[in-house]
Amino acid sequence: MLPFKDEIEQLRQNGITQVAFKRMHDPAVIPLWFGEGDVVTPDFICNASKKALDEGQTFYTHTRGRPELREALKVYLDRLYCLDIHPDRITVPGAAMLGVTIAAQMVLGRGDHGLIVSPVWPNIASVFRVTGAQVGYVRQQLTDNGWQLEVDEIISAVKPNTRAIFVNSPCNPTGWMMGAADQTRLLEYCREHGILIIADEVYHRTLFDAVAAPSFLNVAQDDDPLIVVNGFSKAWAMTGWRLGWVVTPKKHVVQWTALSECFNTGATVFAQMGAVAALEQGEPFVRQLQAQYRAGRDIVDQMLGGHPGVEYHSPAGAFYAFPSVHGLRDSLAFVEAILRETDVGLAPGYTFGPDNDSHFRLCFAQSHDRLKLGLERVVEFIEKNPGRF
């Protein structure tokens, strides 16, 4: 008998990479499957990291992130949310996903229950399951007013052994956002019952009608049961840099120091200098991307909104559409056929949690000509193949 845990043996590849890895670097494919566009990281960010390399900054650095990066994050968050965050609350452990992993490890184990607001990026459930915890979902519902979820529905899904609740807002893949009043209500409940909120706010600047999405940081105290995870991938077009940050309870500075060292030793040192440049100089670029994503959403609205073969509502945030195709039962077979027959890469709905097999996800962060062409092929495929899947 092999010594590996059941939780490891039962892990499966998520549906996005299951489709994408077959033709990931094929130039013939219009790649709408991953959460990124085709805008490269801007020169001012790259040049800051190049300068750090030229200066020989290739050695170990502070486990929780370079001091100048953590200070830049404090300044950025304070300015964005009108706060005064204590510097000890900020850690840069590596990629944002590493922040989610450490947060889950801090509270979940066998016999515990972790609750996830869904639809959700599939790797979150894997992170919860690896701890040995049971995983439960509370699902947003697609209504005439878009994706909706009442905070009392989340609270009603809590079990006596629930130790963590994962909330992604703005949401990948639906674009749903939790408002400040609901954030306050959920945090008050979790404070009273000793439940950790893991708040994924990676899409905090990826929205269309405001400067930033509502943040749990605006309603939290220094030592609330809250870990806010964020990163540079989406707002600054830095997906390949694998840099994220967390804002944690102030009293856990030692624990985050130790866990960051255990999991990653520290984020890549010269990449951190690019992140400093992003925070200090990047606001015009963030606004530029917001405008591009807004126009991309308008294209999706025009091509899918009102289409008789799909149910679609325009997202409030993030840069995804998550339509439901009438009669679709097998989202994996559906997107595999689209890839094979039209050279468009999509993500299957099933991988975003239970009850999503009639859906697919597409990312509209691509340049507009490619997005339009990809959507034209998808719409034509849907119209030619009713009931096939």
Image (spheres, rainbow, N blue to C red):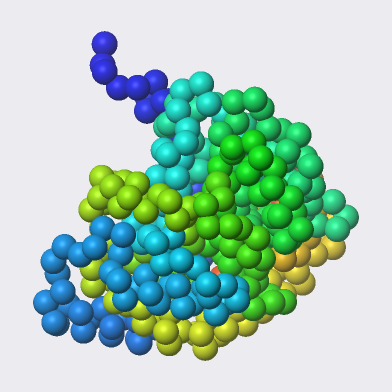
Vertical placement of 134 versus 59: above or below?
A: above
Give residue 185's position: percent from left, percent from top: 74, 50
Report the side of 260 relative to 160 (left or right).
Answer: left
Instruction: Identify the residue at image location x=57%, y=29%.
Output: 113
226 or 200, which is in the foreground? Answer: 226
Instruction: Identify the residue at image location x=46%, y=84%.
Output: 282
Instruction: Identify the residue at image location x=43%, y=87%.
Output: 281
150 or 71, which is in the foreground? Answer: 71
Report the side of 82 relative to 183 (left or right).
Answer: left
Q: Quadrant of residue 70?
A: bottom left
Vertical placement of 162 versus 337: above or below?
A: above
Quadrant where the N terminus lies? top left
Instruction: Identify the residue at image location x=43%, y=31%.
Output: 131
Give residue 166's position: percent from left, percent from top: 58, 45
Residue 292 seen in the current view: no
Vertical placement of 64 versus 235: above or below?
A: above
53 or 308, which is in the foreground? Answer: 53
Q: Quadrant of residue 369?
A: bottom right
303 or 342, which is in the foreground? Answer: 303
- Badge count: 0
Specify the farthest residue to the right.
Answer: 144
Quadrant where the C terminus lies? top right
Residue 85 seen in the current view: yes
